[in-house]
């Protein structure tokens, strides 16, 4: 009897190697599906079940997922761009020109990185407006809103630090202006600017600092906070599907808060 | 009224969803192959900023009679003996360290794993599997010695000035 692809997949799922990695054999029961999600290090951040309403387009416009998608694109293209980029003066500018004119698909990747960055900033704002106007920030989700605000700040900082890296006129003067704005902070202003630039001028030290922030410190922080953000969605009762689905009825919130105080 | 009550049938039809997953995973697999090719092309540099393999070793009278001169920048020896000039790669054939001329012993020695060579490149001792290769040398119109480091020559040749 000829085997179908399904049979081969089932055989694979019954194999010892599969079981050693995923712990779940064949089967499609609800429990089985729940365990598949719960036992996977990446998927366990998410709920094992979701409301149908929460999966619909109108509930979220998929803005959070789209933001995450642009971030994944940014990481993938960013790592590839790092293969040709030296954060030094004036090599950085030459490398950018090489990416534009010499490297195979370099201009495509660079533009994909740039447009995805613009899209990510836009989508983060859109996501936050959607959450705000639907009231999805209300308890028990208020802490996830705070994390979201920090994620917005991280996104803007990534955008800003990435702006200097081409080392052209636009980026040089943008960071000159931006660092002078930072120096307007009372008392610590000039220290903040000095630490940010690693000197008094936008120069080689500033380029290296912005590079390290852009490629290491900020992305790592962002990934960590995204993980917490997703985990909090599960802990707070899944993606917000509307007030009628909330575990804590919205009308009761005021009362509950009084009790805890 | 919730959505769950409106459409109970759709959720109970795993066949349609499985077909969707199959088509989806299949398309993604094809796209991944394209991305792999794309990535390979991207990572293969079209332009290199490496020094030229052809080295200008300067005027022949720079080199005293019966001498071995190492240029550590370019990794070549220019040897002058009674018959003429020849060029030798200074890169050890064992694992690529830069060898050095020992005038007091009259040999070429590698500091990494102790290979020793005669001034003709022939190995005296050590782990090096091959002699130091000879490189093509010629004189240009300005009277400078030029050496091509890109490949070893099998026929040993000397330049007479």
Image (cartoon, coloured by chain):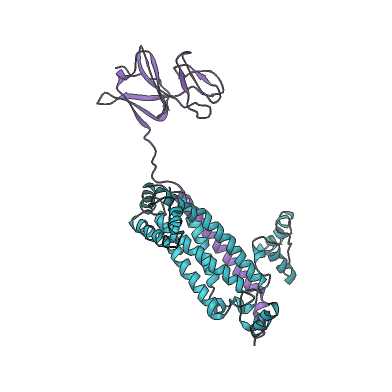
Chain colours: A cyan, B purple
Closer to the camera in the image, B43 or A261 = A261
Q: Residue furthest top?
A: B82
- Depth check: give the residue in front, B80 or A192: A192
Looking at the picture, tell me which residue is in the foreground, A164 or A117: A164
Question: Would you place residue A215 above or below residue B158 in this image?
Answer: below
Q: Is residue B93 above or below residue A30?
A: above
In x, y percent, where is residue A112?
A: 44, 61
Q: Nearer the viewer, residue A77 or A123?
A: A123
| Residue A120 at least partly seen | yes
Left or right: residue A238 compared with residue A163: right
Q: Would residue B34 be visible to someone looking at this image?
A: no
Q: Is residue B55 left or right of residue A52?
A: left
Locate residue B94, reporting x and y percent: 53, 27
Q: Quadrant of the C terminus of chain B?
A: top left
Numbered disc total: 0
Q: Residue furthest front?
A: A187
Is A167 rendered above or below residue A247? above
In the rendered structure, the answer to whether residue A254 lies left or right of residue B80 reads right
Picture residue at 44% right of the left edge, 15% below the top: B103
- Residue A167 location in percent, x, y? 37, 53
The quarter holding residue A196 reads bottom left
Q: Residue B112 occupies which quadrant of the picture?
A: top right
Q: Which residue does the image show at 49% across and 26% down from the upper left?
A: B92
Q: Quadrant of the N terminus of chain B?
A: bottom right
Q: Is residue B44 above or below residue A10?
A: above
Q: Position of residue A10 (x, y in %)?
A: 71, 62
- Farthest residue to the left: give it: B141
């Amino acid at each position: 009897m000829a085997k179908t692809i399904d049979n081969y997949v089932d055989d694979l799922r019954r194999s010892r190697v599969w079981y050693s990695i995923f712990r779940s054999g064949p089967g499609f029961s609800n429990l089985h599906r729940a365990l598949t999600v719960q036992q996977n290090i990446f998927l366990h951040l998410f709920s094992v079940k979701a409301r149908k309403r929460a999966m619909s387009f109108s509930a979220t416009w998929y803005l959070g997922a789209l933001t995450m998608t642009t971030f994944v694109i940014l990481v993938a293209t960013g790592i590839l761009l790092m293969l040709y980029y030296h954060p030094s003066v004036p090599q950085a500018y030459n490398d950018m020109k090489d990416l534009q004119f010499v490297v195979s698909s370099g201009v495509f990747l660079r533009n994909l990185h740039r447009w995805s960055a613009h899209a990510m900033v836009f989508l983060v704002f859109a996501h936050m407006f959607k959450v705000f106007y639907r009231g999805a920030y209300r308890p028990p989700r208020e802490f996830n809103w705070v994390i979201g605000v920090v994620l917005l700040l991280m996104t803007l900082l990534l955008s800003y630090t990435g702006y200097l890296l081409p080392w052209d006129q636009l980026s040089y003067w943008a960071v000159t202006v931006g660092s002078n704005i930072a120096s307007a902070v009372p008392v610590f202003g000039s220290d903040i600017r000095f630490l940010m630039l690693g000197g008094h001028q936008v120069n080689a030290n500033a380029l290296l600092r912005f590079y390290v922030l852009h490629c290491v410190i900020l992305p790592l922080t962002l990934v960590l906070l995204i993980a917490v953000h997703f985990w909090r969605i599960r802990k707070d009762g899944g993606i917000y599907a509307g007030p009628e689905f909330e575990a804590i009825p919205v009308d009761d919130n005021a009362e509950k808060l009084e009790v805890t105080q | 009224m919730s959505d769950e009550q409106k459409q109970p049938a759709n959720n109970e039809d795993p066949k349609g969803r499985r077909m969707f997953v199959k088509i989806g995973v299949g398309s993604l697999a094809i796209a991944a192959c394209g991305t792999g090719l794309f990535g390979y092309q991207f990572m293969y540099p079209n332009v290199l900023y490496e020094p030229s393999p052809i080295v200008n070793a300067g005027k022949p009278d720079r080199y005293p009679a019966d001498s071995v001169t190492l240029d550590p920048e370019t990794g070549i020896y220019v040897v002058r003996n009674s018959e003429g000039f020849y060029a030798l790669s200074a890169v050890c054939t064992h694992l690529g360290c830069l060898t050095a001329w020992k005038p007091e012993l009259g040999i070429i020695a590698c500091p990494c794993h102790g290979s020793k060579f005669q001034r003709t490149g022939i190995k005296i001792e050590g782990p090096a599997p091959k002699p130091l290769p000879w490189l093509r040398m010629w004189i240009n119109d300005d009277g400078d010695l030029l050496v091509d480091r890109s490949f070893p020559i099998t026929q040993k040749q000397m330049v007479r000035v």
